[in-house]
Every structure is written in C-alpha cells, then in structure tokens.
Image (cartoon, grey):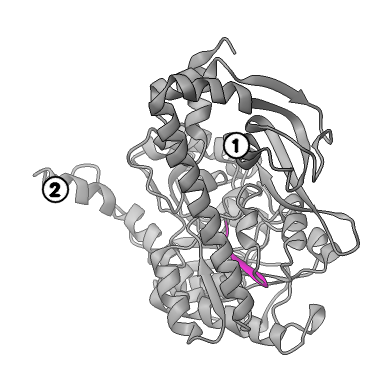
C-alpha cells in the first residue's frame, strides 16, 4: 500500500488500536495485503482454516451463522475500520462464521507468518498487540457475560439505544425492576445492531437508523419488538418490520404542552430579540438599537397541523390575542368553536400569517411543504417556527428567504440533517455541514437541538407509555391488538 498515511489512519480507526504506537503500525502497514470483493462475494466459509486477520477499508463484511433451519443468519456486520480473524491470525483456528462482502468491499489482510517475522524483530510491537488482544477479549467477555446474565434473567429484556443520562434516570425510575434494561449511548445503526444480541426488544429514538437492513439484522438476532420513545416513525421501515414479524410501537402523545410551549418560547425569543439582548448584556453592551419587537396581540398566527401539539399551540396563541388561522385535513368542531381560532386553507394561511408554526408529522406528502413556492406566497418578514420534523422545510429555500428578507426570522428545533449533530457535544469540532453553519450564522435565527420534548413531564410520559406498550406485548398482544402499534399503510 503506497498511501501509508491513509492506511495509518485506517488502522487508528480500529477499536482498541490505541495500544499500538505509530512506529508499530508503520511496521505493519508495509506488510498488509489488499483484497477486493464484489457485493455478495464469499470471503471465507464457517469452519475454513485460515491464518490471517483483516481490517475493513471499504464497504462492509457480513458475519453469518447457521440458523435453526440450517439457513444463514446475519448476526453482525463489520464496517470501515472494524477488524476480524484475530484468533485465526495467532492460533490458526477455523473461521467461526461465514463472511460475505456487502457492497464493493476492500480488506487489508495480515498473515501469521508475516506477523511472526515482525514480532521477532520488534519487542514493542509484540507488547502492543498483546494489549490490543486483551482489550478485544475484554470487550467480548463483557458481551458474553451480558448474554449469560440475560439467559438467567427471565424478565423481558430491552436494549435502549441513543441513551442519555436523563433517559436512563427516568426509565430506571419508571421501570421499577419490571423489565431487564441495558442502556447504550451509541445509536442503533447497521454497525451497532449487534448490540441487540440477546434482547427481546430495542428502544430507539428519532435519529436511530431502523432501515430495512437494520431491521433484518435485528430479526436475525431474535428481536421481537421495536419500541419508539417518540411519536414520529419516519426513520423506521415498517414494511420490513412486518415482513420480519417485528412489532413496532410508539409514544403517540408524550406531552403536547411541552412541544407547543417550546414553539411559543422560540417565537417570543425571536420577536423580542432575547438571544441578541442576552449576548449584548454579557459583553457590557446595554444598547437597545435593533431590538425592537412587536406585540403579539392582534397579529395573525398560522398553525399548520392540528393534532394535540397544534391544538395546544393554537390555544396559547389565542390567549395572546392573536388571530389564529389553523389548517388541518379535517375540521374539529371543538377547535372551530375556540375563541380567536378560524379554519383556513393553506393558501390563506401563507398569504396572511405574520407567524407560521408547523405541527405535523413528516410524510411523503408533507416533505418540503415549506419550499420556494410556499415562501414566495408568504408575507414579507414572516416568522417561521418548526418544532416538528426538519424535512418539512426545504432548508436551502429557507436560507434564500432569510437572505432576501422574505422570511424575517426563524425558530428551528429540528433540522433535516440533524442526526449528525443534534444530541451530541460537537463544541470541540468544526461544523462541516455548510448548510447548518450558514443557518447558525444568521442573527435572526434560533436553533435548538431537538429539545422541545425535554421536560420532566414529557420524559415521564415517554417512559410510562413505553412500559405500557411492553406490558401489552408481554401479556400476549401483538400487531393490531397493541394500543400504540405502528403499521405500514
């Protein structure tokens, strides 16, 4: 491999490679053999003799085991930077699984005899590899210990992905030892699906990947239920789940007041320039220039989507004295009778609203509903609020609207590419998403990190409903019998 710098970076990606120094890895890099495979190619068969390990450079490697019917079941997948075959490298043990290429796969292979020559020449390399191996064994031992514990624990077990301290705290409190829970900080993806081995269910959030590929792996691992701790399910392949016999349940309404109140908070902060005033005062600047806001009373507020959250938002805005225009598929007589609230079509809301707030799910029909055409129909200087799903808004069109002044301000709790940033601390890195960086640069835009749901009440409701969903499943209810089941259309 001529590009040594690249290969060194690849080796550093391998889990536990911190125990190998740069000089040791440089010794290895010139000895690696590069192998290329097409999608579906057999790399090795279970039981094959081998004396080499590998690191995945491109594509992926599927790890397959024989199932009960002698069919092949994918139990895990190795992505870029992952490694395999360590025991074969040292002991020449037969392959413990069948390996197949996924996508155009490229592997770097290290043979036993090559490594043996290196170890004789370099003591530091030998010690580093021993430390490397011990960390790998420790990781695998922890997984085996967890599986053994799970086999002894007869309670229904669930792996909670993308867990944060507040998630673990409230779930443990609400669980009250009824079910066996394991919390993982990492998100559910194709690369992390193996963490679900030994669990009856997985619990996922808005940015977890529950695509067909992941669903099929979960099925192969024995997962029977996917519990969403959110209302939205656009990240789930529902047809794939149904075909695999996996029930999907959700939390349809954890706390509509929490989300609606956050939308109003964004409105008020933008309107009265609270974010700019706060920054000024911290710097000793007490000027009021360019901080002029408007009274909410008498303004026209458009609310698109009249589910539980939209209804709460409309009630609060009506309380401010706004003329509230609401748009929904069906007219609810109770909402129509609310003081200050009027049903209107989309065209009227776009033309007349001073403030526009989105409260509806992301579906193929609602994707990019706020686009260039819709923005052109809006009042100049309109305020746009989105606390629902990032994909409702064409972000490039939004940026153009902000630059032209057509959109006077925007409050966003969601972003269509948020999964790479939201819920994580990225303060030590450069934001490489140019679109997100541009949005942040506007002084008339407030972005929060999908936190509208984050109240004590909402977290408790999410946990309680999740465990109610599990109790129904454990009691023998399945598919349409489950209260909060999500089925493909």
Query: Which is in the foreground here, disc 1 or disc 2?
Result: 1
User: Is 172 in the magenta?
Assistant: no
Q: Are marks 1 and 2 in contact (CB under 8 Å)?
A: no
Q: Position of residue 85 (x, y in %)?
A: 65, 39
Residue 155 bears which disc, if any? none
Q: Is residue 128 above or below residue 227?
A: above
Front-most of 233 and 248? 248
Q: Position of residue 64 (x, y in %)?
A: 78, 49
Task: Give the residue at mark 2.
Answer: 282
Residue 183 shows in the view? yes
| Mark found first going from the N terminus, 1 or 2 | 1
Residue 230 shows in the view? no
Q: Which residues are magenta?
A: 200-206
Q: Position of residue 170 (x, y in %)?
A: 43, 77
User: Is 201 in the magenta?
Assistant: yes
Q: Dividing the picture into quarters, in which one does residue 46 lie?
A: top right
Find the residue positioned furthest to the bottom. Answer: 475
Q: Quadrant of the N terminus?
A: top right
Q: Is residue 96 left or right of residue 42?
A: left
Identify the residue at image location x=64%, y=53%.
Answer: 209
Residue 90 bears which disc, if any? 1
Identify the residue at image location x=38%, y=43%.
Answer: 426
């Amino acid at each position: 491999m001529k590009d040594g710098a690249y290969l060194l970076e690849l080796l550093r990606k391998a889990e536990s490679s911190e125990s190998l120094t740069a000089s040791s890895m440089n010794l290895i890099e010139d000895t690696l053999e590069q192998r290329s495979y097409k999608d579906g190619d057999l790399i090795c068969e279970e039981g094959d003799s081998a004396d080499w390990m590998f690191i995945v450079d491109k594509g992926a490697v599927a790890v397959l085991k024989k199932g009960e019917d002698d069919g092949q079941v994918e139990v895990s997948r190795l992505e870029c930077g992952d490694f395999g075959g360590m025991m074969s490298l040292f002991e020449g043990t037969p392959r413990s699984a069948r390996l197949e290429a996924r996508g155009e796969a490229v592997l770097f292979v290290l043979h036993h005899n090559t490594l043996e020559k290196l170890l004789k020449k370099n003591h530091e390399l030998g010690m580093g590899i021993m430390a490397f191996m011990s960390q790998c064994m420790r990781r695998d031992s922890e997984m085996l210990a967890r599986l053994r514990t799970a086999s002894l624990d007869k309670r229904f077990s669930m792996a909670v992905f993308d867990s944060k301290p507040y998630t673990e705290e409230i779930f443990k409190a609400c669980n009250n030892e009824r079910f066996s829970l394991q919390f993982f900080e990492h998100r559910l993806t194709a690369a992390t699906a193996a963490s679900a081995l030994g669990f009856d269910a997985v619990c996922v959030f808005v940015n977890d990947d529950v695509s067909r590929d992941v669903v099929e792996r979960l099925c192969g691992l024995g997962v029977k239920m996917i519990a969403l701790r959110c209302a939205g399910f656009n990240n789930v392949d529902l047809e794939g789940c149904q075909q695999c016999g996996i029930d999907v349940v959700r939390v349809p309404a954890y706390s509509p007041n929490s989300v609606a109140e956050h939308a109003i908070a964004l409105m008020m902060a933008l309107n009265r320039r609270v974010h700019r005033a706060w920054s000024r005062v911290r710097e000793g600047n007490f000027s009021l220039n360019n901080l002029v806001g408007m009274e909410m009373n008498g303004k026209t507020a458009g609310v698109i989507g009249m589910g539980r959250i939209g209804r709460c938002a409309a009630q609060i805005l009506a309380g401010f004295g706004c003329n509230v225009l609401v748009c929904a598929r069906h007219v609810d007589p109770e909402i129509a009778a609310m003081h200050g609230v009027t049903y209107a079509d989309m065209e009227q809301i776009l033309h007349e609203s001073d403030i526009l707030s989105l409260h509806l799910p992301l579906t193929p029909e609602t994707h990019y509903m706020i686009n260039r055409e819709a923005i052109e129909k809006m009042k100049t200087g309109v305020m746009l609020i989105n606390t629902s799903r990032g994909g409702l808004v064409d972000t490039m069109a939004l940026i153009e609207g902000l630059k032209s002044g057509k959109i006077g301000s925007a409050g966003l709790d969601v972003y269509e590419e948020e999964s790479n940033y939201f819920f994580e601390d990225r303060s030590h890195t450069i934001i490489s998403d140019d679109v997100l960086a541009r949005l942040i640069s506007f002084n008339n835009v407030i972005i929060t990190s999908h936190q509208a749901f984050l109240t004590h009440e909402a977290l408790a409701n999410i946990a309680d409903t999740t465990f109610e969903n599990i109790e129904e499943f454990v009691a023998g209810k399945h598919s349409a019998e489950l209260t909060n089941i999500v089925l493909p259309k």
